[in-house]
Structure formats: C-alpha cells, structure tokens
Amino acid sequence: MIRKRIPRQDDTTIYRLIEELLVPYARQTKPGLLLTPALIRKRLAGGITYVDTAAGRKPAGFILLKPKERERLRVDLLAVHRSYQGHGIGRRLMEKAERTAAMHGCREVELWVDEANVNAQRFYHRLGYGAVYYDVRLRCYLMVKPLA
C-alpha cells in the first residue's frame, strides 16, 4: 500500500534506506558527504514523500517528489529495500509520481541518476525515461519522461 510519509513512524527507515542505497553512489563524487537525520528531515520537508508499506508497517521503499517548474515534477529520491527490489515497489512508486505530476498539471517527470547506478538507469529506461543531459561534475544523468 502506498501512503504519505508519517515522519515519526517512517523517518528512521527512510534514513537507513538513503544511507545504504543512495549515499554510496553520491560519495563517489563527493567523498566527504555527511548526512544526518536532521538534514534528511529537512530535505523530506521540502517535498511530498510517499512510502510503500508492502512490508507491513515499515516502508519497503519511498519516493520524494519536488515541483521543479510549473510543468515539471522531480523525483528527488527513490529507494527500495534490497529484499523488496524486483517486486514492483519501485514501479508502483514511480507510477504514483507520474499520477501526482499529472494531477498538478505537469507535462514531464524528471530525475537524476548516478552514472555508476546502472541498474537504476535500466529501471528508469524500462519505465520510459530517457537521458537528456549528463553532468560531468556530478557524474549523473538527467532523465525525463513526458507524460501523455
């Protein structure tokens, strides 16, 4: 089931998912990157976060959405616990992002993905996202999907 984030209930798991699954890629370009629960809470507060509770009460995965421009929504963070990868959770969360974007009148959904995160690139490509820009400094691709 996908629902909005409940900070008191979800943030510990979200922080752990970010630390385990996303930060290792970010540290390849920023080795000194330090993240604290307070910084994560601040980042989450700047958008809409949904969690998938396929694992019961604890989130098996989450997605953070942020409006980018009038007609574009950004997937700022997406992570699915390793035990639940390949079970459709990431796809469901991305579908939620696309429905949310459409409800807000957005024409596109964008996201950044690390060059080294080849599995994520393949996943997004299967969902219809295409790379439109590469940032050499960050070693990340900007991927975009137009909404029908």
Image (tube, grey):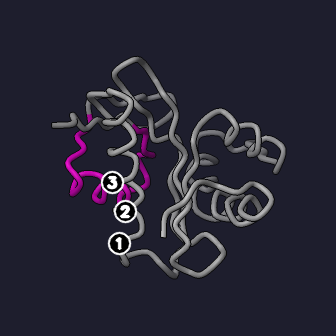
Q: Amino acid at mark 1?
A: Gly
> Can you say which quadrant of the picture contains the C terminus?
top left
SS assignment at label 3: helix
Mark closer to the chain start, 3 or 1: 1
What distance separates the C-alpha of mark 1 from that of mark 2? 6 Å
Q: Residue at x 74, y 45 (%)?
A: 40
Q: Residues within 10 Å of mark 3 (few under 14, many from 20)?
A: few
Mark 3 near mark 2, Cβ–Cβ under 8 Å?
Answer: yes
Q: Is 3 or 67 nearer to us in this picture?
A: 3
Q: Which residues are magenta?
A: 111-131
Q: Which mark is residue 95?
A: 3
SS assignment at label 1: loop
Q: Residue at x 76, y 44 (%)?
A: 41
Where is residue 48, by image quadrant?
Answer: top right
Q: Residue at x 23, y 52 (%)?
A: 125
Name the residue beneath numbered marker 2: 92
What distance separates the C-alpha of mark 3 from that of mark 2? 5 Å
Q: In the figure, 124 relative to 57: above or below?
A: above
Q: Is residue 114 magenta?
A: yes
Number of marks present in the image shown: 3
